[in-house]
Image (spheres, grey):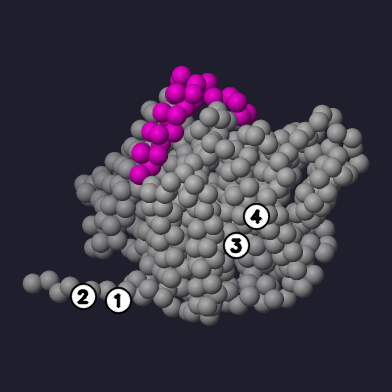
Amino acid sequence: MLDFVVPALNLKAILPQLILALTALTVLLVDVFAKEKGKTSLGALSFTGVLFALIALVLSRGSHESAYSGMLMADGFGFFITLIVCIVTILTILASMNYEKICKNIKVGEFYCLMLFAAFGMSFMGNAGNLIMIFVALETMSISIYVLAGFKTDDAKSIESALKYFLLGAFASGFLLFGFALVYGAGGTLDIVKLGKFFTANPDALHHPMVMGGIALMTVGFGFKIAMFPFHMWTPDVYEGAPTVVTGFMATGVKAAAFAALIRVFFVGFAPLQADWTTIMWVGAFLTMTIGNLVAIVQTDIKRMLAYSSIAHAGYLLVGFVVGTDLARSGMLFYLLAYAFANIGALAVISAMGKDGKEYTELSDYSGVGFKYPFLGLMMSVFIFSMAGIPPAAGFMGKFFIFSEAIKSGYIWLAVFGVINSVISLYYYLGVIVRMYFREPDREISIMAPTGTMVAALSIAAFCILQMGIFPSYIWDLARESVKMIM
Amino acid sequence: MVDNQSIYLALAITLFIIGAVGAICRRNAIVVFMCIEIMLAGVGIAFVTFSSANHSLDGIFMVIFVMAVAAAEAAVGLAIFLLMYRKLGTIDLDKFNLLKW
């Protein structure tokens, strides 16, 4: 007879994610049974759910345990990633309540439900302790986002972006999986911590072609999700075509989750191999930021420009990954949070620039916006300053932490290229500001006045950016503590 | 004498490469998606092979998850293809050029 021991259910370790999933299911149920009028409250319901998840998360701070036979790591690192994901989701939901008034034919029930499921997947990616878990979380997130990208079903651009994201995403996860298979063949386990122990104990297994091939294939798979050169080609198309609030959500949430999984797999699973992957990632970081910035300059569509700028930001983050010290990884976490506020904020402003299903995304539409819509103009300036890395915005501190650590660890050239790239990026970032404040509008545009929720989302994001830029120590300490607590 | 493991591994790699080349070269969205499924089949065989070689069950579980996720992906993918067909009347990937590649 087989002995079967019922595994202990450690609900405490997954409480925030559990709340997210339950809220998503509730939203789906309410959407089915509610009358047309009740559907307006779905956004508020999702917002409350994520808020509760955030509270549960903050209360669990300092937990350091592995649950479900090592499948899940409820540690400081996962805490920080879940924090970013919850914040991103809250801001996106607030912005979407405004957006659903501009694009009236969006089915709100499925929209919020999928967004919550995507957040659920992202958060588990940050907490995953096993390659199986990473794969399932990644797909939970991705499949929800494929649908969200194509949510404007009457807009050919939106459908096309969903199609491209879907085909390339499935293709890339094939590579990721084959990488997992090869590593499993060499290491004999899918548990990340056990893999790390195995490779430390058997250094001669490290340079087996299967391990090398596995790491190369995994780099392709993760590189696709974080939009690393040369796997960035999908980014501008998908970001441009997807509904604007969804673009903000995937530019920040997906990137944070994918970087989290990348850091955990490489630094916990393959720590002894660091010298080997550093060279590849050095080149990747340099090309990613340079190509992203150079191509962003010539864009005429603001969403497309921000897509290329998000590729450049992935490059800056990869600098932190190459340096790889504890402080550099803390810098990455800080940067991811700062970038999340700025990017979601900027895309929320863009999503507010519309009326009756018509959106204005051409750069020329932003001429004179600063005086015509002072609030939106001011908020956009704060977000742009943060992305450009101008003090006192949070983006400056993020870049400072990463590049100063690069110099301390001897990656002087990488830091120099990073700073040069930041200067290049000033050109197109400041171009937006110049347009908003110093140009006359080319054509009349009329937009809907932003609703209270949109004002709230923008104010929160702008406040946090300034707070993190002027008094960075709280978040910086939190990030350092999180990286120390990675298991 | 080649051992069994190498044969199965060779099969897995062959399937994976057939799928990858097909996904890059074919222009019909459904055929591309089918090629991706062939890649996943190759991955599944690799996992089962390693699972039996390592005497561990992790790989088998992974295959079950891969199949479940592939089914979910197919559902979403076919919905997107259908939407595209209704909007543009074709699912030929070369015809989609609203967004620059």
Earlier in the chain: of badge 3 and badge 1, it is 1
Rendered location of residue A171, percent (x, y): 45, 40
Query: Dot 4 falls on which chain?
Result: A
Q: Quadrant of residue A326?
A: bottom right
Q: CA distance from mark 3 to mark 2?
A: 38 Å
**Residue at image x 47%, y 27%?**
B84
Query: Dot 1 falls on which chain?
Result: A
Q: Are marks 4 and 3 on the same chain?
A: yes
Q: Which residue is mark 2?
A: A5
- On screen, residue A62 above or below A149: below
Q: Are marks 3 and 1 on the same chain?
A: yes
Circle nearer the viewer, 4 or 3: 4
Rendered location of residue A250, percent (x, y): 57, 49
Residue A158 visible somewhere in the drawing: yes
Q: Residues within 10 Å of mark 4 (few under 14, many from 20)?
A: some
Q: Amino acid at mark 3?
A: Ile
**Towards the viewer: A123 or A297:** A123
Asked if residue A116 lies left or right of residue B58, the reply is right
Rendered location of residue A135, percent (x, y): 41, 55
User: Is the magenta region chiefly helix, strand or loop?
Assistant: helix
Q: Amino acid at mark 4?
A: Thr
Q: Residues within 10 Å of mark 2 (few under 14, many from 20)?
A: few
**Towards the viewer: A98 or A404:** A98
Q: CA distance from mark 1 to mark 4?
A: 41 Å
Q: Which residue is mark 3?
A: A87
**Towards the viewer: A359 or A69:** A359
Circle nearer the viewer, 3 or 2: 3
Q: Which residue is mark 1?
A: A8
Residue A398 visible somewhere in the drawing: no
Find numbered disc 1 in the image and state the secondary structure of the residue it sits on: loop
Query: Dot 3 falls on which chain?
Result: A
Q: CA distance from mark 2 to mark 1?
A: 9 Å
